[in-house]
Image (cartoon, helix red, strand yellow):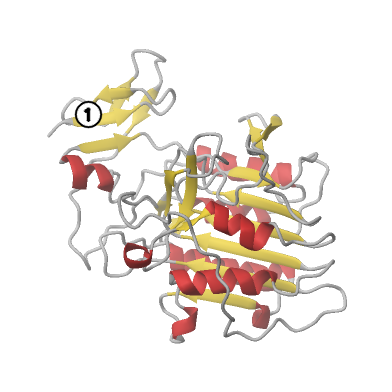
């Protein structure tokens, strides 16, 4: 079987010698570490961890039809100081070849953090996981769309909203000219093979565009290809030393991707062209999403006083961890299914911050 690997620095495709676990790029001289490739597991037999990547040939989101139905959940209790509401979505894809092991852990840990660190009422947190007995709270495409509408329904100045997603992410060809790189980012519901993906255009239309002045929304998206998954106009490009600049991602076609006056911030697991790890390497105990773990750890250790300090801490945690430890599979499933060969990627995952407006990341206080 032909074995190829992408250089972890310049991304050039390299030929991996049989049995090798490291390789030096002849162009940039970076050393890339790889894990031993594993065969695709049969359903119901799980490895310690795999990546949040997925075949992109299945059920594209295409052009979405805006959701217009009612939601089955009660509104959040009113709060004169502003309402706190959250949607937490963790998808394991149980019983499929796309199984992830850390997403349910991510969802439960995020709920605990919101309640105990940021004062979110438990009644105002909507959990969508496969272990929910209520069919309306399972992470299907229909339910995720309803949940996003519920999140922003009746939103007012002073409200603080959170959307956390842990699961598979993907990309598809942009069909309306609003993407700089020509690709829309997507998230994958548990029934994506039958119902299709949810595209970033819809996420932006649903929870970003309606946000009124004085309200704020934080999205924490732990998935592959999630750098611009909310289609926000500005991306904070930060170096390993903490220096940063804002990239302008406003569509060239003039389409408005901002809010109705509110503030939106999105922490995502990786850049649009990267993958996010589902691994035991960080917790040393159980599988988690690398980005969710690094986010919670930074908050718990007091490294989240500002957005810049938080982002820098998250990047450092992942940069200094060998995420390949405990990874059961690094094989590209899509390539295996279509081409019959294995392509290994040197793991390079860098959490990203996007926002509705640029700001000084080292002076603006972070809070949910």
Residue at x-position 28% and y-position 43%:
332
Q: Give the percent coordinates (x, y) of residue 104.
A: 45, 68
Q: Position of residue 134 (x, y in %)?
A: 46, 86
- In terms of secondary structure, where does tag 1 sit? loop
**Residue 84 percent coordinates (x, y):** 74, 72
- Of 155 and 277, nearer the camera is 155
Compared with 29, 211 (above or below) is below
Where is residue 138? Give x, y as percent: 45, 77
Q: Is residue 296 visible?
A: no
Name the foreground residue: 28 vs 251. Answer: 251
Crowding near the residue tagged with mark 1, few <14, some 14–19, many ≥20 C-alpha atoms within 10 Å: few
Whether residue 154 can be seen here? yes
The residue positioned 66% from the left and 64% from the top of the image is: 162
In depth, the one of 157 and 65 nearer the eye is 65
Count of numbered labels shown in the rendering: 1
Occupied quadrant, residue 153: bottom right
Disc 1: which residue: 20
User: Height in image: 101 above or below 248?
Assistant: below
Image vertical order of residue 67 relative to residue 324, above or below? below
Residue at image location 67% in from the left, 48% down from the top: 257
Tell whether 180 sits left or right of 96.
right
Task: Give the quarter of the figure containing the C terminus.
Answer: bottom right
């Amino acid at each position: 079987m032909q074995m190829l690997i992408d250089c972890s620095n310049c991304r050039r495709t390299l030929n991996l010698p049989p049995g090798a676990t490291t390789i030096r790029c002849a162009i940039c001289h970076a050393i890339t570490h790889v894990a031993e490739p594993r065969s695709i597991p049969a359903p119901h037999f799980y490895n310690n961890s795999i990546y949040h990547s997925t075949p992109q040939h299945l059920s594209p989101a295409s052009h979405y039809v805006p959701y217009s139905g009612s939601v089955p959940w009660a509104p959040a209790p009113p709060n004169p100081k502003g309402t706190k509401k959250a949607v937490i979505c963790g998808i394991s894809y149980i019983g499929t070849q796309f199984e992830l092991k850390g997403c349910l852990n991510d969802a439960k840990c995020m709920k605990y953090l919101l309640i105990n660190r940021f004062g979110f009422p438990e009644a105002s947190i909507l959990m969508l996981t496969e272990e929910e007995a209520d069919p309306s709270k399972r992470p299907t495409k229909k339910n995720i769309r309803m949940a996003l509408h519920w999140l922003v329904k009746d939103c007012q100045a002073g409200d603080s909203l959170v959307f956390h997603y842990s699961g598979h992410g993907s990309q598809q060809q942009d069909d309306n000219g609003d993407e700089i790189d020509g690709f829309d980012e997507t998230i994958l519901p548990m029934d994506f093979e039958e119902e299709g993906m949810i595209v970033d255009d819809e996420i932006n239309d649903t929870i970003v565009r309606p946000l009124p002045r004085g309200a704020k929304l934080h999205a924490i998206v732990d998935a592959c290809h999630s750098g611009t998954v909310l289609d926000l106009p500005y991306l904070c490009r930060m170096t390993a030393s903490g220096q940063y600049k804002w990239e302008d991602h406003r569509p060239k076609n003039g389409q408005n991707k901002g809010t109705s006056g509110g503030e939106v911030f999105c922490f995502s697991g990786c850049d649009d062209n990267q993958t996010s790890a589902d691994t035991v390497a960080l917790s040393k105990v159980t599988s988690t999403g690398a980005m969710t773990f690094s986010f919670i750890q930074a908050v718990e250790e007091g490294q989240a006083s500002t957005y810049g300090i938080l982002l820098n801490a998250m990047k450092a945690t992942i940069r200094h961890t060998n995420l390949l430890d405990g990874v059961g599979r690094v094989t590209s499933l899509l390539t295996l299914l279509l081409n019959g060969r294995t392509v290994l990627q040197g793991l390079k995952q860098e959490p990203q911050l996007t926002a509705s407006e640029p700001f000084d990341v080292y002076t603006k206080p972070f809070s949910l």
